[in-house]
Image (cartoon, rainbow, N blue to C red):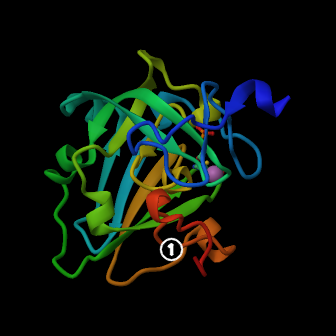
Amino acid sequence: MLGKFFKKPDDDMGGRVPPGQSLTTRFPVLTYGPAQRYDASEVVVRISGLAGEKAFTWADLLALPQTTLTYDIHCVTHWSKLDTTWTGVRVTDLMQHVELDPAARYVMQHSVGGYTTNLSLEDFVRPENLLAHTFDGEPLDAAHGGPLRLVVPHLYFWKSAKWLTGLEFMPADRPGFWEKNGYHMRGDPFKEQRYDDD
Ligand SMILES: Nc1nc2c(c(=O)[nH]1)N[C@H]1C(S)=C(S)[C@@H](COP(=O)(O)O)O[C@H]1N2
Ligand SMILES: [Mo]
């Protein structure tokens, strides 16, 4: 059954497919625990920690510039999906409206349901990272994190929190949910940083 949907790349597609990954044209759902359901009217992204306190509502987010980008995503469970198209607010555009304390070095993403995942500020503030609400021109499915998720395509996909509710800026790194359970603190797919001893 797997062979029908997952195929080993014939080559690495000119360097696009990280080691140990297979391509899929489906879009698998990976959620620890139940999928969360909430309405766009309930969306709030709270800024906390080493930054001026602030909360972005759905309307605030839609008032920011909207960007559509196409890129590849890589899951630590060995699937990669090429050319996924997302629309949302660039992290770099959001950060224009956040008063960051210069002591901030890391950020924790928080989600409905309690999922968390950590990033360094360099991995977070990149022009391709999106607070995404649209996939392939359609509102993002709840199963995939709709109404709003983060997409950080250069790291394994567990670093992209679904149902985003908060961004907590931190002076030092701290493990999120999967990182506490043995996953790598950074998760670069091209370096195969799957587990904390990789
Ligand atoms: N809130 C939340 N975000 C999450 C997860 C989760 O369980 N809860 N799973 C992560 C993992 S392990 C992966 S691989 C991707 C899966 O996203 P998808 O279900 O859209 O494929 O979401 C990440 N973000
Ligand atoms: Mo994952």
The residue labelled by disc 1 is 185
Seen from the viewer's position, the closer of residues 186 and 107 is 186
Q: Residues within 10 Å of mark 1 (few under 14, many from 20)?
A: many
Give the quarter of the image for residue 122: bottom left
Seen from the viewer's position, the closer of residues 84 and 169 is 84
Q: Say which residue appears at 51% left-offset and 26% top-offset.
A: 140
Amino acid type for the residue under numbered disc 1: Met
Q: Is residue 91 left or right of residue 79?
A: left
Q: Position of residue 95 (x, y in %)?
A: 20, 53
Q: Position of residue 24 (x, y in %)?
A: 62, 31
Q: Say which residue appears at 28% left-offset and 37% top-offset.
A: 89
Q: Is residue 165 left or right of residue 98?
A: right
Seen from the viewer's position, the closer of residues 57 and 83 is 83
> Could you tell me which secondary element the residue under label 1 belongs to?
loop
Above or below for 20 versus 58: below
Count of marks placed on residues: 1
Q: Farthest residue to the right: give it.
A: 1
Q: Say which residue appears at 53% left-offset and 32% top-offset.
A: 146
Q: Farthest residue to the front: give it.
A: 10
